[in-house]
Every structure is written in structure tokens, then in C-alpha cells.
Image (tube, grey):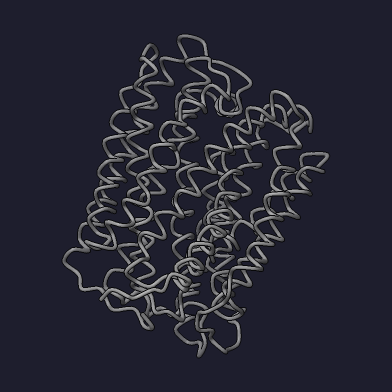
Amino acid sequence: MTTSVTPDARSHTGLALLVIMIGVLMVAIDTTIVVLALPVMQKALHVALSAVIWVIIGYLLTITLVSTQVGRLGDVFGRVLMYEAGFLVFIVGSALCALASNEATIIGFRIVQGLGGALVMANSGAVIADTFPPDRLGRAYGFNSVGYTVGAIFGILLGGIIVTYLSWQWIFWVNVPIGVVAFVLALRVLRDSGKRQKQKLDLVGMLVLGLGLFGILWGITKLSTDPFSAQIIVYLVGGVVLMVAFVFIERAREAPMVHLSIFKVPTMTPTLVAAFLQGLANYAVLFLVIMYLQGVREYSPLKASLLLVPGYIVGSFIGPLSGKLADRLGPVIPATAGLGIQVVALLIYAQLGTTTGMWVVVVASITSGIGASAFFPANNSAVMKASPSQMFGIASGMLRTFSNVGMVFSFAVAILVAARSIPRNLAFAIFVGTTRLTSHLASVFTSGLHSAFYASTIFMALAAVLSATRVFMKSSRRQGA
């Protein structure tokens, strides 16, 4: 049933979506802009080669660890309030990063920045679900995805300009005025309209979930930077044990952090697992392609990143179309089609050789951008439409957690695959952009990349199959819709 919306209401929801897009854009800028500045930051801050990667992974790890928890805080205290708090934390974290003076401070302040990013990303989906009626939800997520892709483009372009003409500190200072403008707009435009749950916070559940995720993700991440050891086994086993304990704790709590009944919604589990598999298959591609372009083809970090821009540009046009299609036909078709298109992109990447024309990279980037932009709005819409309205925050946070866990695993897989062909320190140096490969090692490394891309293809195909199974499931109607 189509919901009737007045022009004034449409104007307000349009402004609200613009504010949310700015927030997502700001977080997305930081995912690409930092990559270009790594060589300069490593030299200026005297960061060890094995530690410089934590400037990226520390940020991602923080968002992954706390997304579900801050989504829950949104359900309890207000999703807009938590979203606006995310702006403030992100602004402070960005300013602190710009003031960092050594390895410890830059990594520590990136963690602060990641906490702000988690508050923004985990609650943005819930704020959209509160603001838009069900029949316009997919289209709203489609436009929100434009914010991310445009942010990724700006990150590459601004990063290139800043690294070339200004100091590295400006890659963080640039977030401050954007964040202040977005925060002021959010205060004026956004209003909490969702149902709040008046109950105590499940602090025990939050702690156990956080520690469990930390053990697993820390163990996996250490595998990418250190040799396999008993300590890594302890982290992995301990994390799994805590995750099992979390399930039993939540079942016994009167007011659990995560109502496990949400997984009984027929389409919820395959949608979340599809997000995990997509992150697992896709995120490593960014690192592997950049390593290929910088190490094998001897491109600068800026030139390597610019080859990926066409994919982001094309993707920015696909997102709204996919969201609109999800509203008309349901999310399964565009989400599954997006995953299938990404399978094709991975197969194209798997053909890269030491003398391959760069047009192949551009074609693969565009194909991947189309697939990702078709998948995300539809899949996000599927999660929020299936979720009860009083649990939008936790559902949005869980979606971010599942996706980011896949991304962290994917990063570890990328480094481990590279380390099979070349020394690990050399792999780090190639990614940072401070060295190149000899012709022999370039050939060996490229052969190793093929294995990684084919492995990612299998994960992406599994995600597509899982997504397609939702056709046979009857999705529960969302409460409050």
C-alpha cells in the first residue's frame, strides 16, 4: 500500500536524507583519503612499516566492534541523538589525528575517529527507516549510497591534492568544517520519531559481545601482521567461547541487548550473512588491486587510486535506481543481481597480468561499482523492512557489524595471500606505496593474486545464492510500518 505524503513532508524528508548523506559522505572520505597519505605519514611520524597498516585497520576494527552496541544505544536513547553524537566524536577524533605526533597517537586517535564513524554509520540506517515510509525506503537507501560513493571519490581526489600540495595533517583537518556543518544541519533538521525502549541497558551483554568480537577480529588481524602463534589461537578460541556465552546470556536476560528472536524473521539471517560474505569477498579487492598497481605496474598511490574512480562514479548513478527497484519488486532481485555482477568483476580482476592493459582495471572497477551499488541499497532495505520498528537501531548496527566483520576478515585474507608469494614486510611496503617489485617477484605476486580473486569469487557466489533463497521465504511485516 502506497503511503500518501504531503509536499511539506517530502521537503522535510528530503532535507533529512541530505543531512544523513553528508554524514555518510564524511565517513566515506576517510576510508580512501588516508590510503594516499600513508607514505607521507609513515615518514613524518616515524611509524614502523608493520604498524602503519593499523592507521587503516584500527579505524575499521573500531567501527566493527561497537556498531551493534551503539545501534542499541540509539534504540534506547534516541537514534538521532546518537547520530548527532557521532558527528561530535568524529570531529574531535579528526582534529586529534591532525595533531598526532607519533605512531601511538595516530593509531589511538584513529580509534576515537572510528567510534564517531560507528555512531554515524550504525544509526544512519535506523534514522532513514524512522523517516521514510516502507514504500520509499529502498530509494532512500539508494540515495544514501550515493553519499558513500561520492565520499570515496572526494577522498581520492582530495587526498591526491592534499598530499601533493599541503601537509598530511589536512587529510584530517578537512573533516572538521564538513562535520561542523553537518552537525548544525542535523540539529535543525533531524527529529527523533522512532519508538524508544524504556529499559535498562544490557551492559553485560554489550561487554561480552565486544570482547568476543575483539578476540576473533584481533586474532584474524594479527595473522596478517605476525606469524601464527599460540597467542593468536588463544584470541580466536577465547573470542568464539565468548560469542557462545553471549547467546546464552541474552537468552536469560529480561531486557537483552539483542533480542535473538530477530533471527527468527525468515529473511533476516540470510540478509545479514549475505552482507558478511559480500564484505569478505569484496573488501580485499581494494587492497589487492592497489598492491598490483603500485607493486607490479609501478604506479603512484594517486594514479593507482584514480583508476578506481570510474567505478565509484558509475555506482553513484546505480544506487538510487536499485533502491527504487527494491521498492517496486522487493529487495531480493536487485540485491542478488548486484552480487552476480560483482562475481563477473572478480573474474575480470582474476585476468590481470604483468602487461595487462589498464582498461581492464577500469572495466573491472566499473563492473564492481555497478554490482556493489545495486546490492547495498536493496540489502539495507531488506534488513530494515524485516525488523520491528522498535529495533531499527540494533538491526542497523548488526548489519554494519556483519558487513565489517567480513571486511576485516577480507583484509587479513588479502595480506595472507600476498605473503604467500612475497615477504610480508614487502607486501606492506607495496601497499603503502614505498617500494616496487622486481620482474620475477611481480610475476609470482600476480599469480598469487589470481588465487585470491578466485577465492573471493567463490565467496561472492555463495552470497548471491544465499540472497536468492529469500525468494522462497515469507518476510514478516515490520511492526509499526
What is the number of callouts on the image? 0
Residue 25 x/y as whole percent:
56, 49
Residue 408 x/y as whole percent:
50, 48
Q: Is residue 348 above or below residue 89?
A: above
Q: Is residue 153 above or below residue 147?
A: above
- Residue occupying image coordinates x 48% and y 67%: 13
Q: Residue furthest front?
A: 7
Quadrant assignment for the N terminus:
bottom left
Residue in the foreground of this view, choosing between 422 and 237: 422
Q: Is residue 318 above or below residue 295?
A: below
Examine the image and state in which quarter residue 350 appears: top left
Q: Residue furthest left?
A: 472
Examine the image and state in which quarter residue 417 appears: top left
Residue 472 relative to residue 313: left or right: left
Residue 102 x/y as whole percent:
81, 39
Residue 92 x/y as whole percent:
76, 55
Examine the image and state in which quarter residue 189 appears: bottom right
Quadrant assignment for the C terminus:
bottom left
Q: Is residue 473 above or below residue 305?
A: below
Residue 144 relative to residue 2: left or right: right
- Residue occupying image coordinates x 69% and y 23%: 164
